[in-house]
Image (cartoon, grey):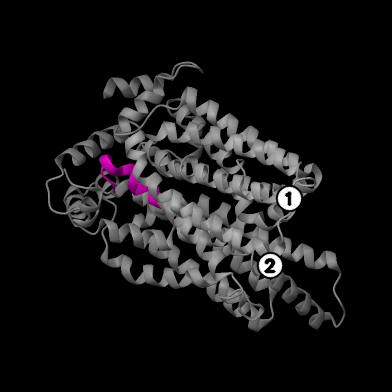
Amino acid sequence: METLLQQLTRGKALFLIFILGIGGSFQSGYHITSLSSPSPFIRSFINITLYERSAAPPPAHTVTIIWSLIVSMYAVGGLFGAVSVKCFSGLLGRKKAVTCNSFIAIVAAGIMLTSKWAKSYEMIIVARMLAGYSAALGANIHLMYLGEISPREIRGVVTMSSATFIAIGKLSAQFFGLSEILGQEELWNVVLCVPACLSVVQVIIMPYLPEAPRYLFIEKRDDKACKQAMQSLWGQGDYKQEMAEMLTEQATMEAAPVKSPLRLLRDKSARWQLITMSTISCCNQLSGMAMISTFAFDIFQKAGIPKDQIRYITLGLGITGILTFIPCGLLIERVGRRPLFWMGYGIMTACWLLVTVVLNLKACRSWAPYATAVLIILFIIFFSGGPGGASGTLNSEIFVQSNRVSAFVIFGVQRWFVFAVMGLVFPILIDTLDSYCFVFFACSCLLGCVFVFFFLPETKGKTLLQISNEFKSITLCGNSGPEERRLETKL
């Protein structure tokens, strides 16, 4: 029996996973946390620019509004990027879509880099919107590409690498943002452009790597190119079993053609897949992880940790995420997806409840701030090793090829919409509810735990059609409609 490393290194698979990662999910992770360090310098730049234009000190609320636009335009760009996934991946294919997206990231970085010299905060807003567009588009195509190159036996490990690159991106932003590295006033624009260097590498190398085999076989109907791509990725072999699975899925697609996002939302046969991923996506976004990444400084300041120690604690959070994602990638094919979800959500619930209790003790207990930091690190461990890591794998497994691209569009839009809303609401929430705002996150995690435990079927080691049939057997909301029965008759 071959080891995982031997399987990944027989062909170009491991190299392709790395190249996809640095231009895909890495970019999303980096940009989520990249504004944390240079935020005071950008505010100062806005203030100076407005003063030079009007020869008078600008009102404080004007600077705040412009800063809010810079922050929020990333999420707005992300919404448009999520909607564009179907268009890019369908028209260009997976490989060309990845390359095209890298050019967008490079353009965004160029605008950001020159904004300081041009003394234009408007250019920062445009660059942030383009960066959000590129990050959302790239992360979705990255995950789609991984799901379509991986054999069933190691599909979980391969798709899990997407979450690992998000964690590496977050850590990189925290590292480059240190004052000892690039976190200085004269270099704030450089900090925000670091990922573009990796996009350049991706543009240069991608033409020499193979297209996704599943895309070639099912959508382009080129079985010869598909076999060549699989041999290039995974070494020499006949791959009859994998191609037989694709042939079965292709027959299913002929009976049920590719659906638009709106048609997929109305499709009863995909009802439970949509409910499942929508619930898990919302629970992940509302679990508090996104707020830790974006507002770590505010959270730890509220906990009572000295300001000069916060940046090093946030760096530790990034390291924790990476160290957890890696073993999770190895565990996911052993323990399955379902236990990682419900156990992770359960422990995350307990962490937030304990954070609420400890924060109420900070006035009379000197250890309370540091206990809060330990609990948040524990939360990150179980998020990264559970729902955060396994979500990408599940999203690639529960939708057949005819529904997958539209599903990525739907959940991409949902993810970025919730992210934008939480980004606007959380600062108000933490000021209004103080420590009790974390009870809201605990309730979201508890909902995820209960839902997964009772409704999510295990997907480990199963074909996409087997997984689809397991979802069809769920009858809580009634049986599937006539469309589904006709499909089963033809198969």
Quadrant (top left, top right, bottom left, bottom right) of the C terminus: top left
For the residue pair 427 and 268, the one nearer the viewer reads as 427
The amino acid pointed to by label 2 is: Ser
Residue 469's disc number = none
On the rendered structure, is 7 left or right of 42? left
List x then y, in percent, for residue 14: 28, 57
Q: Which span is picked out in magenta? A: 150-161
Residue 159 lies in the magenta stretch: yes
Q: Quadrant of residue 207?
A: bottom left
Residue 209 lies in the magenta stretch: no
On the rendered structure, is 448 left or right of 159? right
Q: Earlier in the sequence, mark 1 or mark 2?
A: 2
List x then y, in percent, for residue 257: 36, 36
Residue 113 lies, with reference to residue 486, above or below; the image says below
On the rendered structure, is 361 left or right of 281? right
The local secondary structure at tag 1 comes to loop
Q: Quadrant of residue 69?
A: bottom right
Which circle, 1 or 2, is nearer the viewer? Answer: 1
Residue at 53% from the left image edge and 27% from the top image edge: 451
**Mark 2 closeness class: few <14, some 14–19, many ≥20 residues within 10 Å:** some
The local secondary structure at tag 2 comes to helix
Taking the image as drawn, is residue 186 in sight? yes
Q: Quadrant of residue 389?
A: top left
Q: Which residue is mark 1?
A: 366
Q: Which residue is mark 2?
A: 39
